[in-house]
Image (cartoon, grey):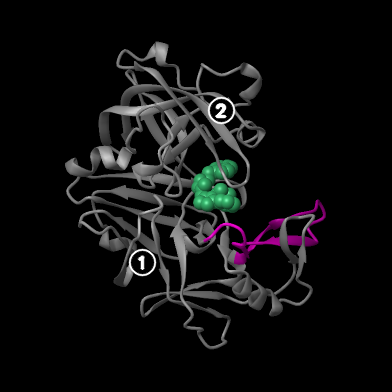
Amino acid sequence: DSGSARASPEQYDIQYLTPVEIGTPPQTLNLDVDSGSSDLWVFSTEMPASSVKGQAQYDPSKSSTAKRVQDATWNITYGDNSYSEGIVYKDVVNVGGVSFDAQAVEAATAVSQTFTTDANDDGLLGLAFSTINTVQPSQEKTFFDNVASELDAALWTADLKYHKSGCYDFGVIDDSKYTGQITYTDVDSSDGFWMFDVSGYGIGNNTFQSTSFQGIADTGTTLAMLPAQVVKAYYKQVRGAKLDNSQGGYVFPCQANLPSFVYGVGNARYEIPGQYINYAPVDNDGTTCFGGIQSDAGIGFAILGDILLKSAFVVFDASENVPRLGFAKK
Ligand SMILES: CCNC(=O)c1c(-c2ccccc2)csc1NC(=O)CNCCc1c[nH]c2ccccc12
């Protein structure tokens, strides 16, 4: 079995939304496929109308295959202090043609303002490791873990693009989506993330620095959160850039000519065009812009979010006893 689903960007590529069918007859919700968390949670008819501003809601009472998981609850808080919580159903979930008939669908009973204000995002589909799923008293499995044994290959791939729709594929590596070789690197999943060693970095045409650091491949985080020293060195090359704590990170004049950023996986090098690192304006007149590369201070590891991932074809491979990540140019 294999499948493919579209990943459509929201404004500024803040996140990518993928249509997911839930229940019988199918209810289509647009979810944020998130390799940085492991809960499949959705806006639902179980939450107060005041928290819903345009999102589609999963209605278990309209699904003949929905079954309540008695006494099960969940709650999750992300690093940006957004959160959601609720109750649990088992139901049919279909992503790009790959289906599982008893997927834990975590129906929200409450969500924070961040999620309420994002009208197009109907929830998240977590694809990190099931060890960090938040359902209690008994943890549930991610969609990928549930379908892995049915897939032609126990892997999924991410092909995100800059201000354009991309694809998530399940069970197959589509060779037409990348060029050259795929460079694989082992994953340390002990924290529940797709964590690997970044072998170094380069800024613009400066020489590549072979100083490695640990990072996670995280499709659910918009920006790249990198070691403070790397970030400082990057913005030193940007005239007018400054760390503005009121904005929560580095900002610069929107007209700035940003250097490219290179990250290493093993001996391979992947370049992010400078343009990708101009994330979005922070003011209405568009004079000051917020950087797509920010510090990972306080997190404990780097986060390679969409800003970096969209420059590569990425393979999330659990087909061997040690999971691994593959990166290729495209
Ligand atoms: C800023 C979002 N990222 C994180 O908090 C995060 C952290 C993290 C931990 C502490 C401080 C900062 C970040 C570690 S792994 C990790 N990755 C995830 O948590 C991935 N899921 C993010 C889901 C998410 C959080 N806020 C949103 C707003 C819109 C759409 C999706 C989201």
Give the mark nearest the N terminus, 2 or 1.
2
Judge from the rendering whether residue 223 lies leftward or rightward of residue 196; answer left or right. Answer: right
Q: Quadrant of the C terminus?
A: bottom left
Percent of width and height locating residue 43: 51, 26
- Location of residue 273 (image quadrant): bottom right
Tag 1: amino acid? Phe
Q: Is residue 72 above or below residue 247?
A: above
Q: Which residues are magenta?
A: 277-300
Marker disc for residue 327: 1
Q: Which residue is mark 2?
A: 55
Percent of width and height locating residue 158: 38, 54
Pick the front one: 109 or 207: 109
Judge from the rendering whether residue 265 lies leftward or rightward of residue 300; answer left or right. Answer: left
Marker disc for residue 9: none
Please tell me whether mark 2 or mark 1 is closer to you in this view.
1
Whether tag 2 and tag 1 are in contact, CB under 8 A, the answer is: no
Q: Is residue 190 above or below residue 116?
A: below
Judge from the rendering whether residue 109 lies leftward or rightward of residue 315; answer left or right. Answer: right
- Determine the secondary structure under disc 1: strand
Mark 1 Cα within 10 Å, few/some/many (few <14, many 20+)? many
Tag 2: amino acid? Gln
Q: Is residue 284 above or below residue 288?
A: above
